[in-house]
Amino acid sequence: MMQSRSQFSDDPVMDGEQYSDTSGGSAGAARYTHGHGTAVLSAHSRRGAEDSAAYLLPHLNAGMDLLDVGCGPATITADLAERVAPGRVVGLDAASGALEAARATLAERDLPAGVELTNGDIMSLPFDDGTFDIAHAHQVLQHLSDPVGALAEMRRVTRPGGIVAVRDAVYSAMTWYPEFEGMELWRSVYMATARANGGEPDAGGRLLAWAHRAGFTEVTASASTWCYATPADRAWQSETWAQRCLTSFGPQAVDLGLARRDDLETMAQAWRQWGGSQDAWFVVVHGEVIARA
């Protein structure tokens, strides 16, 4: 069973819009490579605090004020809110579609009072200095052209002695078995597309360095994984990425001259072949840091 479930996104209509990590017009914004479609929101909605923010949980206490930057559908936000109640919790996202999903999530959960949602830009957070005890971002910095600036802004709104907590994937460290023709092509095309869009798909391995550059001196770095090895997890992982190849980052790659149309079918077929194998196993590696403000 995977330790933490999900990643990213896809929608042929909304490819060019930004989702949970950037805001149009800000200097640090990059194009959101995954898009905002049903498959992406579905993927993001599988996440929770236990599988996506376990490194942060020991630092949470009742009554803390917490900001979740790039909250997406707010499934992690809701879990964190339960742990810091009756503290104030704000889920912030730059995309209206993500906030709609977040509102639906909160409506379904029996959460304590004090949970808010707001539209905003990570590069210019709409809060005074020292507003929160915790500023958290999950799978956000990899999509930014200025992750150091984003960390500095998260630090600004965190109280002295508080925590800035971030977690991101390391695409070059992802590993799988068995190999099918098209899987390595998928990785290389995705990573090239993400970088062409201004992001860094290996962000997880750079978080410690970025935190130091943002001025943090007390930083604890760690790593964790998601493992897809059960029949249900394999089926979900393979189909969501097959769809992304065809409808989210794949068309962007074609537009950028990084792939041909037939490459998209090759990548999607490889994912489906992988998912159809009873031996299939896939691990996503994440870097994470706890940085004291």
Image: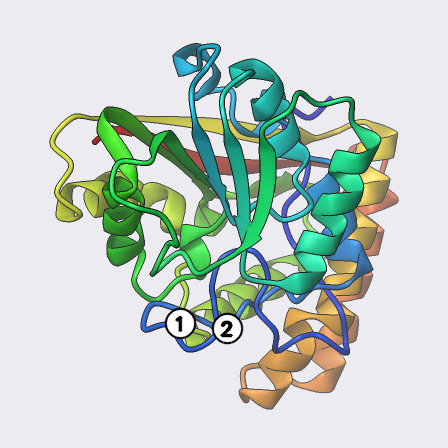
Front residue of 222/238: it is: 222
Amino acid type at image mark 1: Gly
What is the three-letter code of the residue carrying label 2? Arg
**Which residue lies under the disc numbered 2?**
31
Q: Which residue appears at 59% of the width and 79% of the height?
A: 253
Q: Which residue is rendered at x = 33% and y = 36% of the image?
A: 131
**Left or right side of 156 for 115:** right
- Vertical order, 173 against 85 (above or below): below
Residue 125 lies left or right of residue 85; in this view the side is left
Display coloring: rainbow
- Image quadrant where one finds the N terminus: top right
The residue shown at (79%, 32%) is: 279
Report crowding for label 1: few under 14, some 14 to 19, many 20 or more residues within 10 A (C-alpha). Answer: many
Task: Give residue 190's position: percent from left, percent from top.
Answer: 56, 65
Closer to the camera in the image, 278 or 288: 288
Residue 184 as seen in the image, left or right of residue 231: left
Residue 88: x and y, percent? 50, 28
Q: Residue at x 39, y 54 (%)?
A: 126
Residue 146, x across and y down, in percent: 29, 63
**Neighbour tally class for label 2: few under 14, some 14-19, many 20 plus, Cα within 10 Å:** many
Whether label 2 touches label 1, CB < 8 Å: yes
Helix or strand or loop: what does disc 1 sit on? Answer: loop
| Residue identifier under label 1 | 198
Q: Is residue 16 at all visible to an observer of this figure?
A: yes
The answer to which image quadrant residue 17 occupies is: bottom right
What is the tally of numbered marks visible in this picture? Answer: 2
**Figure check: 41 above or below 289:** below
